[in-house]
Image (cartoon, rainbow, N blue to C red):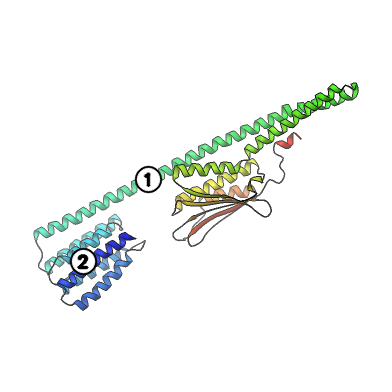
């Protein structure tokens, strides 16, 4: 904002000096100044029409032709306004505006009898320099946008690759758990039954000791399978890992909050993956469309024991949005597991919230043994 005030101060200073030194009617000059100041303030808007610049040029030229003595300040003001427009207008509009202001400058010079070859050459050189500066500025802006887009796609591919590796590890742990159940678990169960029969038939306490050892081995096997299951269901842990990675790579500042009781909620492998994917997509969406590097992620527990999540980021101005591919994909994933997704925005924040139902009967791997 200080840049605007600096430009405004220079603009006002040029006008004030012209009125004090060269004005033929200071009262009317003050009216023209008020109109010019009003138009200049509108230049601070986010989207500025070229009509506003044209109106400001007309005000400057009319005042310079009819109400001031011959001087270069009118041409300097036109040049100054053109310099400001080079920072806001597109390349084609800027070229049109420069051609117009060159023509107006020549008219002012002719009317005030200031038209010289040196002045004409200087004006053409200055305006040509502005066109070249605008071209290079637009070029570098396009290159920067392209670089940021490619960098975003690269980071997305890296995250997808990491997710694929994590899914492969989950599948491998599932296979190992099934193998333990099919081989060790069943054999130990059969061994315990046989030892029980032998202990009854032979009245030998040694068989009961062996049976006790086999039961302890079966219990340890159950604990091992549960440990595998817990590793698979670490949906919260993968989210933490994702946030750490995004903060390191994208300079994203994430305020991550885990409410009480969340870590004790049992989630199946499928639901853990959905939680990870939804948070990942919401953070990616915040990076792309948010106006701040700060994002809030809250994972909580509902009154009925389900997992709730909320991802919010700042926006400068609320505007209409549609469900793109990312949001539609998130909604479909949650609906497949009977979850829920809500997306809405306030005046200055964008929210992605939802619910993932808890595991009703935890019978994935551990229950196949017992």
In the picture, residue 205 is in which quadrant? top right
Where residue 146 is drawn, which disc sits there?
1
Which mark is nearer the camera, 1 or 2? 2
Circle 1 Cα neighbour tier, 10 Å, few/some/many (<14 / 14–19 / ≥20): few
In the picture, residue 95 is in which quadrant? bottom left
Q: In which quadrant of the rendered image does the C terminus lie? A: top right
Using the image as rendered, state which of residue 94 and residue 158 is in the foreground: 158
Residue labelled with disc 2: 14
**Location of residue 266 in the rendering, given as x and y in whole percent from the top left corner:** 67, 44
Q: CA distance from mark 1 to mark 2?
A: 40 Å
Residue 98 visible in rendering: yes
Using the image as rendered, state which of residue 54 and residue 199 is in the foreground: 199
Q: Is residue 360 left or right of residue 112?
A: right
Disc 1 on helix, strand or loop? helix
N-terminal of the pair, mark 1 or mark 2, is 2
Q: Is 240 placed above or below 189 here?
A: below
Q: Is 191 placed above or below 169 here?
A: above
Where residue 138 is drawn, which disc sits there?
none
Residue at 50% of width from left, 40% of height from top?
A: 159
**Location of residue 22 in the rendering, given as x and y in whole percent from the top left corner:** 15, 72
In the picture, residue 11 is in which quadrant? bottom left
**Location of residue 65 in the rendering, given as x and y in whole percent from the top left corner:** 16, 71
Q: How many marks?
A: 2
**Location of residue 7 in the rendering, given as x and y in whole percent from the top left corner:** 27, 62
Residue at 49% of width from left, 50% of height from top?
A: 285
Residue 339 visible in rendering: no
Q: Is residue 222 left or right of residue 72?
A: right
């Amino acid at each position: 904002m200080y840049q605007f005030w600096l430009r405004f101060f220079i603009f006002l200073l040029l006008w004030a000096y012209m009125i004090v030194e060269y004005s033929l009617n200071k009262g009317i000059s003050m009216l023209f100044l008020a109109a010019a100041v009003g138009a200049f303030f509108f230049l601070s808007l986010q989207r500025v029409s070229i009509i506003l610049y044209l109106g400001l040029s007309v005000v400057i030229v009319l005042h310079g032709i009819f109400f001031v003595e011959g001087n270069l300040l009118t041409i300097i003001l036109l040049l100054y306004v053109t310099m400001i427009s080079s920072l806001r207008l597109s390349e084609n509009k800027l070229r049109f505006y420069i051609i117009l202001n060159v023509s107006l400058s020549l008219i002012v010079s002719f009317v005030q009898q200031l038209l010289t070859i040196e002045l004409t050459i200087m004006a053409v050189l200055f305006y040509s320099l502005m066109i070249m500066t605008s071209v290079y500025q637009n070029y570098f802006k396009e290159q920067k946008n392209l670089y940021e887009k490619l960098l975003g796609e690269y980071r997305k591919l890296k995250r997808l690759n990491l997710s694929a590796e994590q899914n492969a590890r989950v599948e491998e742990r599932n296979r190992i758990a099934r193998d333990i159940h099919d081989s060790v678990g069943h054999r130990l169960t059969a061994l315990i039954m046989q030892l029980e029969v032998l202990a009854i038939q032979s009245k030998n306490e040694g068989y009961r000791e062996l049976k006790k050892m086999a039961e302890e081995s079966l219990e340890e096997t159950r604990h091992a399978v549960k440990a595998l299951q817990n590793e698979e269901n670490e949906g919260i842990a993968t989210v933490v890992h994702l946030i750490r990675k995004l903060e390191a790579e994208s300079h994203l500042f994430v305020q991550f909050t885990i409410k009480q009781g969340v870590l004790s909620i049992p989630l199946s492998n499928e639901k853990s993956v959905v939680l990870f994917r939804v948070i990942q997509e919401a953070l990616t969406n915040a990076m792309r469309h948010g106006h701040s590097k700060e994002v809030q992620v809250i994972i909580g527990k509902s009154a009925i024991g389900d997992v709730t999540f909320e991802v919010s980021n700042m926006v400068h101005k609320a505007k209409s949005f549609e469900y793109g591919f990312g949001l539609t994909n998130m909604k479909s994933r949650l609906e497949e597991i009977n979850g829920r997704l809500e997306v809405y925005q306030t005046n200055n924040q964008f929210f992605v919230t939802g619910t993932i139902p808890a595991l009703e009967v935890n019978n994935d791997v551990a229950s196949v043994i017992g």
